[in-house]
Image (cartoon, rainbow, N blue to C red):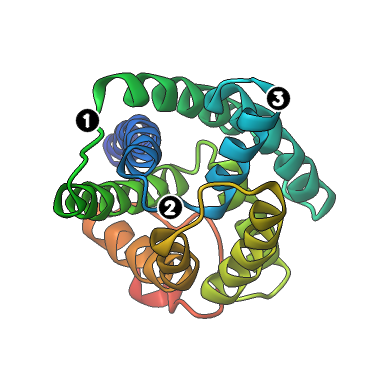
Amino acid sequence: MKRADVDRVFVTKLAIYLVGIVFTGMGIAGLLQARLGTDPLDAINAGVAAKTGLSVGASSWIDAGLVLVLAWILGRRPKVGTVLVAFFIGLVINAGLVVLPSPHAMAGRGVLAAVALAILYLGVTGYVLSDLGAGCLEELMLAMVAKGARIHRARWGIEAVLLVIALVLRGPINVVTVVFVALTGPVLAWTIPHIAAWLRVPLPHHDPNIPLGDIR
């Protein structure tokens, strides 16, 4: 690969890494503000925050650290960028909870939840493709993929376990939580290879469900 191509890929990866962090944090904050349920991990974060008095962002740092330890045990050593993702997403969540509206009407809450979910998926796809350090759940997902699991099955398993923990902690679980558990695996299995091809960046992992030869 020519130096110019290497530089282009690095700049692209850095850009989608930074955008991914902002999108993910704002997406999570949007789901919390919509009050129709959030993803299972952030339902856990909210449950921990309610029981301990910590902010949701601070709770997310603790929970992210525990998940990263598990990913490391499975062979996915955290990068510096991974730690930064966990730290800065916590800050963005706290900021998002301040600046984003909290609609009262069900229609407004539904629109906010749908937009927040779409932004969240784009954000996760962005920092996964950057290969500069994914979020804690994505690192665990990639560790499982490296062991031979398919993206959607790995993610379904992760989200199902987290959902049970969130239920125990009485986190904000609602219709969006169920949608998130059902859709996240298939959505990421589609967005990661297709957006990689569109941005012309290499995939950061080998998922047997993705024909890598088709990605340029």
Q: Considering depth in this image, is 98 or 131 the residue closer to the camera?
A: 98
Q: Name the residue carrying label 1.
A: 101
Determine whether label 3 and label 1 are within 8 Å by CB. no
Whether residue 118 sits left or right of residue 166 in the image: it is left
Query: Rounded to the nearest whole Å, what is the CA distance between mark 1 and mark 2?
Result: 16 Å
Left or right: where does residue 125 sit relative to residue 99?
right
Which mark is first along the chain, 2 or 1? Answer: 2
Left or right of residue 13: residue 151: right
Q: Is residue 171 above or below residue 195?
A: above
Tell me the residue that label 2 is attached to.
37
Amino acid carrying label 2: it is: Gly
- Which quadrant of the figure has residue 77? top right
Which residue is under mark 3?
Answer: 52
Judged from the image, the secondary structure of the residue bearing numbered disc 3 is helix
Residue at point 26%, 34% (across, down): 102
Which residue is pictured at 33% across the width and 26% down the height? 96
What is the x, y in percent for residue 157? 65, 70
Neighbour class for label 3 at 10 Å: few (<14), some, many (≥20)? few
Report the number of numbered marks: 3
Please say whether residue 214 is visible from this viewpoint. yes
Mark 3–mark 2 Cα distance, whole angstroms, equals 20 Å
Residue contact at pointers 3 and 2, CB within 8 angstroms: no
Q: Quadrant of residue 175?
A: bottom left
Q: Secondary structure at mark 2?
A: loop
Q: Answer few, some or many: residues within 10 Å of disc 2's Cα (few below 14, many 20 plus, some between 14 and 19).
A: many
Which kind of residue does numbered mark 3 sit on?
A: Thr
Residue nearest the observer in this picture, 202 or 192: 192
Screen quadrant of the C terminus? bottom left
Q: Position of residue 5 (x, y in %)?
A: 29, 41
Q: Is residue 77 visible?
A: no
Residue found farthest to the right: 73
